[in-house]
Amino acid sequence: MQDDVANIAPLRRQNDATPEIHTADGAKIIYNLPFNDLLFQAQTIHRANFDPNAVQMSRLLSIKTGGCAEDCGYCSQSAHYPTGLKASKLMEVERVVAEARKARDGGATRYCMGAAWRSPKDRDMDAVIAMVKGVKALGMETCMTLGMLTPVQSASLAAAGLDYYNHNIDTSERFYGEIITTRTFADRLETLSNVREAGMKVCAGGILGMGETVEDRIAMLVTLANLPTPPESVPINMLIPIPGSKLANAETVDPIDFVRMIALARILMPKSHVRLSAGRTEMSDEMQALCFFAGANSIFIGQTLLTADNPGEDQDSALFRRLGLKPMELGSVQ
Ligand code: SAM
Ligand code: DTB
Ligand code: SF4
């Protein structure tokens, strides 16, 4: 079995000038392996690349909430849907840095700042650059997600010391237009390329549970794995249904299918951090344990994501104790 799988998806050497190209058909064969074979394969690859018991912990802050011009059907922050969320202005730099300090003292090694923008306005750049510098000075890794970026904006964030930029492709190219109409899948890829060109690390993933097919989910991972350099971080979100949004009543994802996707992400992108992102409040400890076994090795900690709930610290430390997991030290891998 091992050899068969290795033939379908040879371990690509990342950053190689001639990387293996993954095909949707090959990825589908892996996805449909007997569950035990799939998990064994994923765990074997995981162990070859990471400490299997270490999980990276990031903390999120919404630095600018709500009132977004985009019409993303899953989002609480889109102005196109009556989600009841109150919009607010860009936070002050000092407040952001103070929140980051608290997160660092609570064990987070990376601070992720998110803004409900289609893209940053030039007048906002000085403030976000000051935030990057202030958070970096605390000794944390920095990540931002601000919407689409031009090459110039990407370069100035990189120069300020921004380590990661999060920009999700969310789903397959085929299904994208069902979820978002105010921008295209190609727009997303263009920003990812601008971010990469500017020398930042890329965080890009998507959401499961928006009414997409299994083929759409696989196509999303194949797109990410086939980028010239795959993302260093791949967040896999389970849709948090937002009342009032277009996807308020979307059908939930089968937990076994979700775990299969984590395993596929681990196999297609052996050296990337696979992040078990939104939706953990609805996952049992057992489901999360299977996700970690399948290769997930990063989570968001803290009571709130951007606007929605996340398991709090007490719950996560109990889970980590039950599973013998430990926080990943900064700089231990990658
Ligand atoms: N405005 C920026 C953008 O769209 O790139 C950054 C913030 S946006 C909220 C970041 C990501 O969060 C989205 O790309 C999406 O993948 C995820 N997300 C948003 N709402 C979600 C929800 N209700 N459930 C799961 N994931 C969600
Ligand atoms: C990602 O993929 N998930 C995070 C982060 N990147 C920015 C955001 C999840 C948001 C969940 C919904 C909310 O809190 O509003
Ligand atoms: Fe705006 Fe981002 Fe939400 Fe889309 S996902 S509505 S771009 S905040």
Image (cartoon, rainbow, N blue to C red):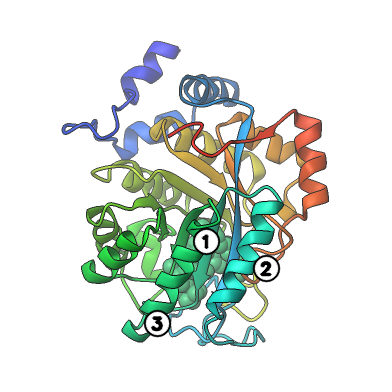
Residue 314's spot in the image, x, y percent?
83, 49
Name the mark nearer the viewer: 2 or 3: 3
Sequence-first disc among 1 and 2: 1
Dot 3 amino acid type: Asp
Which residue is the site of mark 1?
135
In the image shown, does 13 or 173 lie closer to the viewer? 13
In the image shown, does 217 or 183 lie closer to the viewer? 183
- Residue drawn where x is 60% and y is 21% of the image: 36
Q: How many numbered discs, if any?
A: 3
- Work out whether residue 275 can be spotted: yes
Does residue 164 appear left or right of residue 78 in this picture? left
Q: Is mark 2 within 8 Å of ligand 2?
A: yes
Name the mark nearer the viewer: 1 or 2: 1
Tell me the element at label 2. Answer: loop
Residue 175's spot in the image, x, y percent?
39, 62
- Corner quadrant of residue 101: bottom right
Tell me the element at label 3. Answer: helix
Checking the image for residue 308, the label placed there is 2
- Say above or below: 220 vs 1: below
Labelled pair 2, 3 in contact (Cβ < 8 Å): no
Which residue is the site of mark 3?
124
Sequence-first disc among 1 and 3: 3
Name the mark nearer the viewer: 1 or 3: 1
Quarter occupied by the C terminus = top left
